[in-house]
Amino acid sequence: MTKIIVADDSYAQRKTIVRLIKTIMDAEIIEANNGVDVIMQDLTDVDMIISDIIMPIMDGMKLTQHIRRVKQADIPIIILSSDLSERDVKKGRQLGVTAFMQKPVDKNKIEDILHTYL
C-alpha cells in the first residue's frame, strides 16, 4: 500500500489534503504538524511527502534539506504554498524539492501530483 506523509501546521489543511488523497487512491497517510514530526518517522517505506512550506519548528525547506542530506532519502517531496515566489522555487530546487503545489489544493492538483510522482 502507498504510504504518504502530509505535513501542515493547519489541521484543516491537513484534513483537506488527506480527504482528497483518499478519494483518489487507497493509501496509508501519516499526518504531521511540522518537519520535526516527519523526520521522527521511519521513512523507509514512505512513498511521498507533501509538506507546507511555512510551519513552526521546522519548515518545508529545512525538512527537505534534512531528508536529502541527513537521511539521504530520494522520496518525492511536494511543497505546498499559498504564495510561491521565484526565490522559493529556486531555493527549493537546490535543496531537492521534487515539485511545488499552489494552495488552495483541489482534487485535480493532488491527482496530477500523485500520478506524476508515485
Image: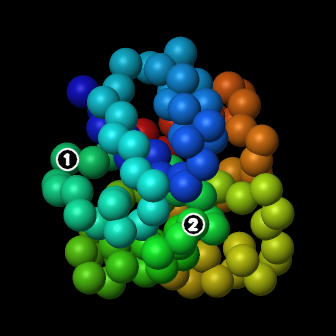
From this view, report whether residue 14 is shown above or below residue 60: above
Residue 100 place in picture, x, y as percent: 66, 58
Residue 45 is tagged as 1
Q: CA distance from mark 1 to mark 2?
A: 24 Å
Q: Residues within 10 Å of mark 2 (few under 14, many from 20)?
A: some
Residue 115 seen in the figure: no
Q: Judge left or right: residue 9 versus residue 49.
A: right
Q: Where the C terminus falls, by quadrant?
A: top left
Q: Judge left or right: residue 96 versus residue 52.
A: left
Q: Nearer the viewer, residue 38 or 87?
A: 38
Quarter of the image where one finds residue 73? bottom left
- The answer to whether the residues at label 1 and label 2 have Cβ atoms under 8 Å apart is no
Residue 70 place in picture, x, y as percent: 26, 82
Q: Earlier in the sequence, mark 1 or mark 2?
A: 1
Residue 33 is tagged as none
Q: Residue at x 22, y 57 (%)?
A: 41
Q: Where the N terminus falls, by quadrant?
A: top left
From this view, report whether residue 107 is shown above or below residue 64: above
Q: Nearer the viewer, residue 77 or 55?
A: 55
Quarter of the image where one finds residue 20? top right
Residue 83 seen in the figure: yes
Q: Amino acid at mark 1?
A: Asp
Q: Amino acid at mark 2?
A: Met
Q: Residue at x 35, y 26 (%)?
A: 27
Q: Residue at x 46, y 46 (%)?
A: 6
Residue 63 place in picture, x, y as percent: 43, 72
Residue 45 place in picture, x, y as percent: 19, 47
Q: For numbered disc 1, what is the local secondary structure?
A: loop
Q: Which residue is mark 2?
A: 55
Q: For numbered disc 2, what is the local secondary structure?
A: loop
Q: Residue at x 59, y 58 (%)?
A: 52
Q: Residues within 10 Å of mark 1 (few under 14, many from 20)?
A: few
